[in-house]
Amino acid sequence: MDNNIGTDPGQQPLAPQNSPHFSKTFIILMVIVMVVAVGIGGYMVGANQSQIAQPPSQSLPPVTQPSPTPTQDETANWKTYRSSRCEFEISYPSEWKLDDASNKQEKENSAYQLGGVSIEAPNFKRVLEANTGMNIFITRTKLGTTSPRGFIINSVDDYIKSVESHPYSEGAAYNKQDKNYGSLSGKYFELNAFGKSASFVIVKNNDLYALSWPKKDDDPYINSINQILSTFKFTP
């Protein structure tokens, strides 16, 4: 009988068993590899997208703001009347004319009213009964003097009363109000005398200046009155 130990045909060889430490390490490595792979893939995708050609942006031309249209000075070609005696000046349209005959005829020692001047539109006509057309009549009155009808002129109200007493006046003045023309402040009033008239009265120092004109709203030159009055100024 042989002493050799035979292999039991019913006994199978055992497979080697992995250790628990080796399995955990392998899993961790796989997770790390997957995370790195995902990160690299995401970076590559982002890099490729950034390299996609974008259509060039169109630069818009700068917006040019329109220059404001310069306001035309309608009085640039007007004439200017200057009275050294009455110490004022006023401008008027070139087609209007100036009549200062009354100013020249005034006596230099006139105590009440120192001259007058009429600025007349092309449609103005001087007639005996009543003037027609448009004009502005300017006078200067010394305060403290007596009018031909016996009124002592110490204020604008005194002047208005003296105008109301004129033989051609058809009643009391009305629509009295403080008003401005240009840089000047004064008293405005209306009166019926040979039709409706309007006056603007200014007091400077010891002098009273009155600018009067026909109040005709349908006159083609009525719109020039405000502009003309706005040019009135005192001179040294």
Image (spheres, helix red, strand yellow):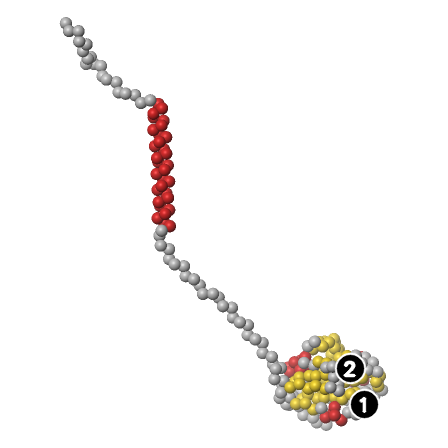
Identified by mark 2, the residue type is Leu
In which quadrant of the rendered image does the C terminus lie? bottom right
8 vs 39: above or below: above
Q: Percent position (x, y) of residue 142?
A: 80, 84
Which residue sits at x=68%, y=86%?
Answer: 81
Q: Residues within 10 Å of mark 1 (few under 14, many from 20)?
A: few
Numbered mark located on residue 12 in the image:
none
Q: Give me the C-alpha separation between circle 2 and circle 1.
A: 15 Å
Q: How many neighbours does mark 2 have within 10 angstroms: few (below 14), some (14-19), or many (20 or more)?
A: many
The residue sitting at 51% across, 68% down in the picture is 65
| Residue 30 visible to an observer of this rendering | yes
Q: How many marks?
A: 2
Quadrant housing residue 110: bottom right
Indicate the amino acid at tag 1: Ser
Towards the viewer: 73 or 120: 73
Whether residue 139 is visible here, answered yes or no, is: no
Position of 200 with respect to 39 (left or right) is right
In the rendered structure, the answer to whether residue 75 lies left or right of residue 24 reads right
Secondary structure type for disc 2: strand
Foreground pick, 146 / 81: 81
- Residue for badge 1: 110
Write down the residue under mark 2.
Answer: 208
**Residue at image point 20% right, 12% down:** 8
| Residue 78: percent from left, percent from top | 63, 85
Considering only order in the chain, which callout, 1 or 2, is on the residue closer to the N terminus? Answer: 1
Q: In which quadrant of the rendered image does the N terminus lie?
A: top left
Spot the residue most to the bottom.
128
Mark 2 and mark 1 in contact? Answer it, CB < 8 Å.
no
Residue 15 in the image: state x and y as whole percent: 26, 20
Residue 209: x and y in percent read 76, 82
